[in-house]
């Protein structure tokens, strides 16, 4: 039985979404960030002290995006690409989401919504929004006349990128200049598997 550590209100949502897309049966171990992630027991599972963690048949994996790539490839239900070139594209977009987009989105989210008001730094949030302008343009151009990022169907590339980008509206980022990206994000986030993951 697959075990996925991490409550849905954390980056574990990304991997819960993948598990739901694949229709796998799994146990969601309700580890809450900060309160449960620094105990000696949990640090033995992931010395980084972060969720998500996946355990399956003696394998322990951390890093949400890596977990999703592993699952999509192992339980191929059309979410893993068919050619090596498209695998390259899937990896490119997955790494891109983490290196170009995640920090600006999380920084703005924390400083506009997540942190107690007294600890929020409006300047940090505005700088983060500014840093997101260029990657948003890149995504929007890549999606011109395209429904999904790689090939014609929804793949792990879309899931990985959308699972990072879905917090951009909550971080009060203005996506109105990026109609392709906005429409694509709507297509990805309206998938029933995401709704099920949010209720896991
Ligand atoms: N790069 C990691 C980041 C994981 C991460 O930072 N998770 C947060 C929750 S969203 C966490 O577990 N924080 C608790 C802690 O650091 O103690 C991933 O994508 O899996």
Image (spheres, rainbow, N blue to C red):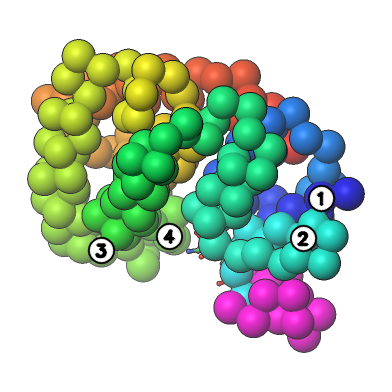
| Residue 43: image location, x then y, percent | 71, 81
Q: CA distance from mark 2 to mark 1?
A: 6 Å
**Mark 2 Cα within 10 Å, few/some/many (few <14, many 20+)?**
some
In the picture, the disc for residue 2 is 1
Determine whether 68 is above or below 199 in the image: below
Q: Is residue 135 magenta?
A: no
Q: Nearer the viewer, mark 3 or mark 1?
A: 1
Q: Could you tell which of marks 3 and 2 lies nearer the N-terminus?
A: 2
Q: Could you tell which of marks 2 and 4 lies nearer the N-terminus?
A: 2
Q: Nearer the viewer, mark 2 or mark 4?
A: 2
Q: Could you tell which of marks 3 and 1 lies nearer the N-terminus?
A: 1
Q: Is residue 90 visible?
A: no
Which residues are drawn in magenta? 31-48
| Residue 81: image location, x then y, percent | 47, 33
Q: Quadrant of the C terminus?
A: top right
Q: CA distance from mark 3 to mark 2?
A: 37 Å
Q: CA distance from mark 3 to mark 1?
A: 40 Å
């Amino acid at each position: 039985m697959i075990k996925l550590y991490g409550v849905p209100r954390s980056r574990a949502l990304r991997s819960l979404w993948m598990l739901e897309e694949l229709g796998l049966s799994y146990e969601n171990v309700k580890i809450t960030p900060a309160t449960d992630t620094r105990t000696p027991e949990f640090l033995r599972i992931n010395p980084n002290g972060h969720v998500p963690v996946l355990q399956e048949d003696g394998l322990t994996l951390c890093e949400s995006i890596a977990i999703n790539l592993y699952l999509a490839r192992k339980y191929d239900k059309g979410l893993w690409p068919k050619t090596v070139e498209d695998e390259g594209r899937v990896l490119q977009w997955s790494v891109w989401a983490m290196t170009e987009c995640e920090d600006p989105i999380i920084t703005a989210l924390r400083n506009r919504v997540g942190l107690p008001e007294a600890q929020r730094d409006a300047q940090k949030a505005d700088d983060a929004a500014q840093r997101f302008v260029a990657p948003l343009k890149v995504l929007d151009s890549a999606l011109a006349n395209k429904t999904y990022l790689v090939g014609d169907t929804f793949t792990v590339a879309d899931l990985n990128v959308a699972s990072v980008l879905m917090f951009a509206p909550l971080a009060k980022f203005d996506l109105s200049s990026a109609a392709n990206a906005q429409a694509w994000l709507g297509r990805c986030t309206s998938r029933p598997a995401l709704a099920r993951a949010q209720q896991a």
